[in-house]
Amino acid sequence: MIFGIAPYNPILGETHHVTRGNLNVLLEQVSHHPPVTALHATDEKENLEMIWCQHPTSKFYGTSVETEVHGKRQLKLLNHRETYEMNSPKLLIKFLPLPWVDWVGENRIRCHETGLEAELYYGSNSWIRGNARTIKGKIFDSTTFELLYEIHGQWDRTVKMKDVSSGKETVIYNAKEAISGLKAPIVTDLKGVWPSESAVIWGVLSQAILGKDWNKAREAKKVVEEKQRELLREREAKGETWVPNHFSVAHSKEGGGWDCAPIQQWVPPAPISVPL
């Protein structure tokens, strides 16, 4: 890498606030050591809510890096009074023989109210055989263990779901359609952008990277990180502890788990918008 080191290192209190349609999303970096990111997303029209608290840990294996994403993820369908809890598969980054990125491991999704549960398995078979980035799983009733649906496909192409009772197959995810429809975010209210917004904090660094001015990029990164060290010294001198602005955070040292509860019931519309 020309830059020499990872250019971005999320700082304490850094945020990203964005809107797409009726969905408003807010992320905040609630811990720096270890890195923990909290997410709250709400859609008042559809009456749904998402709450995530993510803490990644990585292991280096010489020719690859495997990152395990810890933390609780919840999707709440408030109209139905249903909460779906899920974990995350591991992210695998290979360097040799060729650069390669894949999800691996198990992903479980469960709704306690309905008893519905999904078990998904992400595979990392050799890309040479043409069947990498695979996903396979099932949806069943955890109270009776009745199998309802089978899932199979490749997450970077298409994923299909088969109704066990009828045998009918349905495409539930098409990566090409999903990605081709994405549009770049735009700033709709410049004055409403918070100073903690990622694009503001790393703006000079990003412009330097785009302009391939590596010396300026390194200096910009140094300025951001030195400011954080100065703020830390000031807090320590005053005996203060930093508190997140948008989440209430609890940490269990014994279990190593993090719980991030949003302070607001609904995420407000953001000054940054992703067009539909």
Image (tube, grey):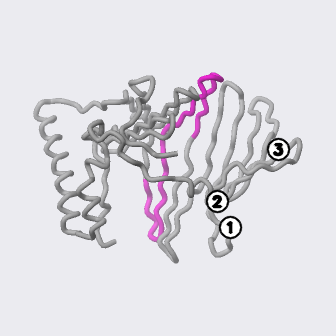
Task: Indicate the secondary structure of the residue bearing disc 3.
Answer: strand
Residue 66: numbered disc: none
The answer for how far apart the CA atoms under marks 2 and 1 are is 9 Å
Which residue: 46% across, 66% down? Answer: 61
- The vertical placement of 55 against 22, above or below, is below
For label 2, the crowd category at 10 Å Cα-Cα, with few meaning under 14, some 14 to 19 and many 20 or more, is some
Principal secondary structure, stretch drawn in magenta? strand
In the image, 56 versus 187, the foreground residue is 187
Q: Is residue 71 magenta?
A: yes
Q: State which mark lies toward you, 1 or 3.
A: 3
Kind of residue indicated by mark 2? Gly
The residues colored magenta run 58-86
Side of 117 where 202 appears, left or right: left
In the rendered image, is residue 257 in sight? no
Kind of residue indicated by mark 3? Asp
Indicate the position of residue 72 as horizontal and vertical percent values. 51, 36
Kind of residue indicated by mark 1? Asn
Which residue: 48% across, 67% down? Answer: 64
Q: Mark 2 highlights which residue?
A: 123
- The vertical placement of 165 against 99, above or below, is above
Task: Indicate the secondary structure of the residue bearing disc 1.
Answer: loop
In the rendered image, is residue 168 in sight? yes
The answer for how far apart the CA atoms under marks 1 and 3 are is 23 Å
Q: Quadrant of residue 154?
A: bottom right
- Asked if disc 3 and disc 2 are in contact, CB closer than 8 Å, the reply is no
Indicate the position of residue 46 as horizontal and vertical percent values. 58, 29
